[in-house]
Image: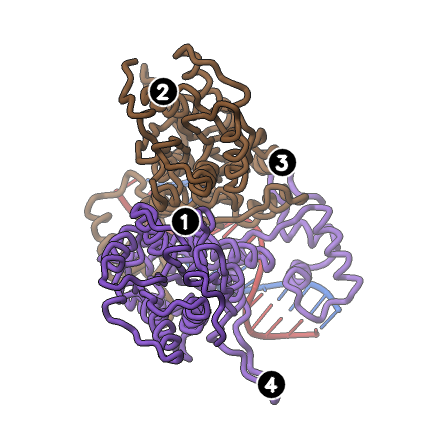
Chain colours: A brown, B purple, C red, D blue
DNA sequence: CTGAAAGCGCTTACAG
DNA sequence: CTGAAAGCGCTTACAG
C-alpha cells in the first residue's frame, strides 16, 4: 500500500496508509477544526513516516491560495532589498509560503505588462513593493486590475485603502538634526534626495522642523539637491564647502551621498569629524565600512518585511468587539546610530537643549 | 463564447474562440512543431485578444516542468547575491520562468530538511547555489536525493558531474599581484580569507604564483589570516603595518577586508596610495564609495547568473556530430579594475616586466 | 467528526 | 497537421 518506488508519495498514499479518506488528510494538513485527536495524530504519524509534502502546484490549482508571495524591486535600492528579502523569506517559510522575486526597471515602457504577466502566471497571494516601485502608478494599477493584494514598503503616500509598512522618516530626520544641534552645530547643510523619491521630502521636512524648533534659520545656500548617489554627494560637498561661511556639519538624505561627502572632505584635507561632522540615513552596508563610520538611521528592514508578509498571508479580520481595528498602515520604530562621523563643534561639548 | 466575466480566460476559452482543440492551443503556446501556420496565427491572435496567460500551477501539475528556478543563498555574501539575483530574474523572465529565493543559514542544524521541504513543495526545475552554500555537503546531498538539477556558483571544487559557473580566481589574483609588482612594489602583504571558503585558497595561490614568478619571496610575516570581514581587515592592517619593515602594498582577499585596511591606514595617518597601496577583490558596492576608490576585481555576477539559469532551463543536449561537448563547468572572464588605491612605489613609476 | 464526487487548468500519451 | 480522453494531486462544496 506504500507509494510506488521512485515517485513521491501523494495524499492518496497517506490516506491509504492511515486508513482515512484524503479529505481527512487534507483537513489535518490545513489545520482545519473538527478532526478527532486520534485521527489527527495517526495522520501526522503517517505523514512523517512517508515524508509526505503536499505539492504546491496541486494545492494552488485546486484551492484559492498559491502560497506564493511576490517581491518586486528595482535595483538601485539593492541594500534596502537585501534586508527586506531576508525578513520576507524567513517569515514566508514559517507559514509554508515561498517568495518569488522579480527585478524590474522602473522606467520600462512595458512595466505594467511585465507585472500583469507575472501575476497572471503565478497568481501570488500577495505582493510586496519596495521603493521606487511602490510609488509607480502603472505598477499599482496593474496589480489592482489583477486583484492582487499588496503591501507597500515606505511609500510616498499612505492611504487607508493601501496597506503599507514604513518608519517615520520625518521624525528620524528630526532626531539626526537634533543630535547635530546638541553637539553645538548651527551651520548645518542638508543634501536632499531626488524629488521623485518619497523619502527625500520627508527627510528634508524633519531637518527643517528641527532647525526651526531650535530657532535656527535654514540657509538656502546650505541646502543642495542631490539624487541619492555617491557622485552627487561628492558634488554637493564641493558646492557646500565652498560657501563664504562653511557649514560645520552636513546631513545627507542618504548614506551614499554622505559617503560622497566623506570622500570629498578627505580629499580636500578636512578631518572628519574634527573639521566637519557628517550624518547619513539608511545604515547601508558601506556606512560601517568606512573611517570614520557614519552616524545614520537604521530602518528595521527585516522586521518591516516580516510585517508585510504577515499582512498578506493573514489579512486583517473583523476586529473583536471593542478591540481597536488592526492598522493596515504600520509604522515601525527606527534606530538612531550615533557613530564617529559626528562630534561636538570645536570641542564645545554637548550643549544644553 | 467568451470567458465568464470576472474569471481569467482558460485554454478552453481560447480553443473555443479560435475554433480549435485545446491541444492545438497547447501546441502553439509551447512552440511545438507541426502546427499549420494559419492555425498558429489564429490561435496567437485570440491569445492576444483575450490576454490569455497559462496558469503556472496547472502547467506544473500536468507537465514535467514547474517553470520555477530556486536560488539558495546565505546572507553574508549579500553583495554577491544582488548581482546574481538580477541576472537570474531577467534571464528567467525571457523564458517564462520565475525565481524563488530562499535565505538559509549555513550552520542551521536542519538545513537539509529545509532544503528538502522546499524542493518537495516547489519542485523547481533547477537550483542555483551561491557560496558558501554551494560547498555545503548536506545541502548538496538533499538536492541530489530529490533529483533536483543544480548549478554551483564559484564552488570550491569543480567536478564534471556537477555543473558550475565561476571566474578564474587564481588567475585574477595573479593579475592583481602583477599590477602591484609592475608598480614597483616588492614588500607586498596578503590577507587571506577563512579556510572554509573556496575563494580564500585560490586567491592566495594566485598571489603566491605571481610573486614567485617574479623572483620575489613570500614573506610569512606579511601573510595574515582574516575572515573576509571589515574588522578582520582592520586587525590585519594593525598587525602588518607594525612589522619591522612595513609592506608598501596590501592585497586583501576581498573588498571588505581591503576597506578595513583602508580605514586603519587613514586612522594611522598613512596616505593611500602614496604611503600604502591597497587592492581588494569582488568590486563590492562600497569599493567605489570610499576615497580613494579601491583597485579590485569584478566578477560578472549578472552574466554568471544568466549562464546558470541557461544551463538549468536548457540542459545540454547530445552534442552534434563533431561539435565540442558543451561544458558543464563554465569559466567567465573577470575584469581587473585599476582605481586610485594603488600607485607606483615612491614615484618609481611603472617598472618594466 | 468523516467521506465520495467533482473539478481546478493544463500536458501527456495515443490515435488518426 | 489535429483532436478526444485521461490524469496530474490537491481543495471545494456537499452530504451524512
Q: Judging from the image, what secondary structure is the residue with disc 1 in?
A: strand
Chain where mark 1 sits: A
Q: Nearer the viewer, mark 1 or mark 2?
A: 2
Q: Are marks 4 and 3 in contact (CB under 8 Å)?
A: no
Q: Which residue is mark 3?
A: A138
Q: Are marks 2 and 4 in contact (CB under 8 Å)?
A: no
Q: Are marks 1 and 2 on the same chain?
A: yes
In the rendered view, would you say B90 is above or below B137? above
Q: Are marks 4 and 1 on the same chain?
A: no
Q: Residue at x 72, y 45 (%)?
A: B1
Q: Judging from the image, what secondary structure is the residue with disc 4 in?
A: loop
Q: Which residue is mark 2?
A: A181
| Closer-to-camera residue (A201/A290) | A290
Q: Are marks 2 and 3 on the same chain?
A: yes
Q: CA distance from mark 4 to mark 3?
A: 48 Å
Q: Which residue is mark 4?
A: B323
Q: Which residue is mark 1?
A: A98
Could you say where residue A307 lies in the image, as x and y percent from the top left? Answer: 37, 34
Which mark is first along the chain, 1 or 3? 1
Amino acid at each position: 500500500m506504500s507509494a510506488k518506488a521512485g515517485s513521491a508519495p501523494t495524499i492518496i498514499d497517506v490516506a491509504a496508509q492511515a486508513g482515512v479518506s484524503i479529505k481527512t488528510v487534507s483537513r489535518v494538513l490545513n489545520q482545519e477544526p473538527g478532526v478527532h485527536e486520534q485521527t489527527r495524530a495517526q495522520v501526522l504519524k503517517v505523514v512523517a513516516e512517508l515524508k509526505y509534502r503536499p505539492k504546491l502546484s496541486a494545492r494552488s490549482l485546486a484551492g484559492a491560495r498559491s502560497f506564493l508571495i511576490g517581491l518586486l524591486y528595482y535595483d538601485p535600492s539593492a541594500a534596502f532589498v537585501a534586508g527586506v528579502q531576508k525578513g520576507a523569506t524567513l517569515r514566508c517559510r514559517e507559514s509554508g509560503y515561498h517568495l518569488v522575486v522579480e527585478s524590474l526597471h522602473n522606467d520600462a515602457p512595458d512595466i505594467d505588462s511585465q507585472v500583469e504577466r507575472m501575476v497572471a502566471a503565478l497568481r501570488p497571494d500577495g505582493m510586496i513593493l519596495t521603493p521606487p516601485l511602490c510609488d509607480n502608478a502603472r505598477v499599482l494599477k496593474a496589480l489592482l486590475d489583477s486583484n492582487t493584494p499588496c503591501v507597500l514598503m515606505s511609500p510616498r503616500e499612505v492611504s487607508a485603502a493601501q496597506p503599507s509598512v514604513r518608519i517615520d522618516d520625518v521624525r528620524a530626520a528630526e532626531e539626526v538634526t537634533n543630535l547635530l544641534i546638541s553637539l553645538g552645530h548651527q551651520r548645518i547643510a542638508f543634501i536632499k534626495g531626488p524629488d521623485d523619491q518619497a523619502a527625500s521630502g520627508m527627510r528634508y521636512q524633519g531637518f527643517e522642523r528641527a532647525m526651526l524648533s531650535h530657532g535656527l534659520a535654514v540657509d538656502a545656500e546650505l541646502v543642495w539637491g542631490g539624487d541619492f548617489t555617491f557622485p552627487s554627494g561628492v558634488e554637493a560637498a564641493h558646492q557646500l564647502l565652498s560657501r563664504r561661511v562653511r557649514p560645520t556639519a552636513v546631513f545627507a538624505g542618504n548614506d551614499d551621498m554622505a559617503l560622497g561627502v566623506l570622500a570629498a572632505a578627505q580629499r580636500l584635507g578636512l578631518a572628519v569629524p574634527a573639521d566637519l561632522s557628517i550624518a547619513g540615513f539608511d545604515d547601508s552596508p558601506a556606512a560601517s565600512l568606512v573611517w570614520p563610520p557614519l552616524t545614520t538611521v537604521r530602518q528595521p528592514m527585516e522586521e518591516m518585511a516580516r510585517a508585510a508578509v504577515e499582512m498578506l498571508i493573514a489579512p486583517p479580520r473583523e476586529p473583536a468587539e471593542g478591540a481597536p481595528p488592526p492598522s493596515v498602515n504600520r509604522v515601525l520604530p527606527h534606530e538612531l546610530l550615533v557613530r564617529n562621523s559626528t562630534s561636538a563643534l570645536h570641542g564645545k561639548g554637548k550643549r544644553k537643549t
